[in-house]
Image: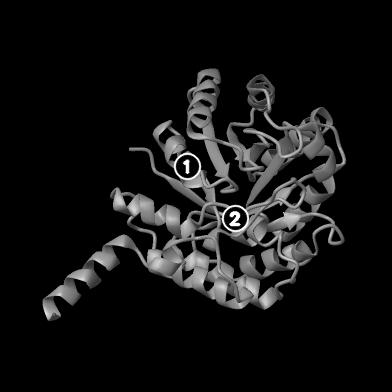
Amino acid sequence: MTRIVIHEVGLRDGLQMEREVVPLEIKEGWIRQAVTSGVDIIQVGSFVHPVKVPQMADTDELFRRLRRDKTSSVVLSGLVLNERGLERGLECGVEMFCLGASASETHSMKNTGMSSSEATRRIIGSAQQALAAGKKVQVSVQSAFGCGFEGPIAEERVLTMVAAYLEAGLRNISLADTAGHAFPDQVERLFAAVFKLDPSVEITCHFHNTYGLGMANILTALRSGVSLFETSFAGLGGCPFTRVAAGNVATEDFVHALQLQGQRQDVDLAQLITLARDVAKYFDRDMPGCVHKTGPLHRVGQETGQKKETE
């Protein structure tokens, strides 16, 4: 069985929508909790202009702090949208660069100020530089399943971008449901088409839960052969440059679903639940995730049994 890889993106995709800037020390504490949970990759932040996304202004310093005393095998990733972001990431010790371009022209212009074709060309160039520097690299097609501004995105457009990445020697490719428009049949069809282009490609999926289909889409991707998944603690998140922003599938919910099926038992679900509850307490509001509120299913069963025994 192919090992499932969990990429925690709460510190980046989760926080970029929050108006209140979380202090550096709080972020660092959350990251260290995620590290001890046993997830595989943690996205520390993005290298974007601090005026556009103030929440990410301390990304460079976070990487420096985490790299200073790092002993775990967790991979520290960072999102890059241009050449300057790549330079910053190389300077502060990013271990895995996540770079992406949008299949939607409208979203691309709002997110990067570039057309989709220009963004793809520049992302490929930066990704190749990162590989040459000995770094892990993941490239993505954003708005791959639909756009909040343009509606449906032609699958041929997505596959053309995937083919361009493959031709450039970039083999870890993510399809991101930026607007949350994906549905299971579409997910199955599009991933099958990508695997047809190259059966050995490493595919990552990233689903938003805008219309309540996030977990269904993730499980469909899993059955379709996808092995790398991006999720966010407590279900935080959303792209600030799409029309209707909504959270991601919660990491603890995904791990809970996996463990019910006997997979990724090595991940500390209790630690992830604690982290999600800490985040909910910090923001003092209800979070989109479920399991941090209900507790895991096996624990509910145990508690029910104990109650019956004492009645």
| Residue 6 on image: x %, y % | 48, 51
- The mark closer to the camera, 1 or 2, is 1
Quickly name the residue at label 2.
Answer: 9
* Picture residue at 39% right of the left edge, 34% below the top: 223
Quadrant occupied by the N terminus: top left
Q: Nearer the viewer, residue 125 or 262?
A: 262
Quickly name the residue at label 1.
Answer: 218
Circle 1 sits in a helix, a strand or a loop, which is it? helix
| Residue 216 on image: x %, y % | 45, 42
Quadrant for residue 111, please give it.
Answer: top right
Circle 2 sits in a helix, a strand or a loop, which is it? loop
Whether residue 183 sits left or right of residue 62 in the image: it is left
Quadrant for residue 115, please give it.
Answer: top right
Task: Give the amino acid type for the residue marked by disc 1 in the picture.
Answer: Ile
| Residue 274 on image: x %, y % | 46, 72
**Residue 309 in sight in this render:** yes
* Picture residue at 68% right of the left edge, 37% below the top: 143
Whether residue 53 sits left or right of residue 191 in the image: it is right
* Picture residue at 75% right of the left edge, 46% below the top: 243
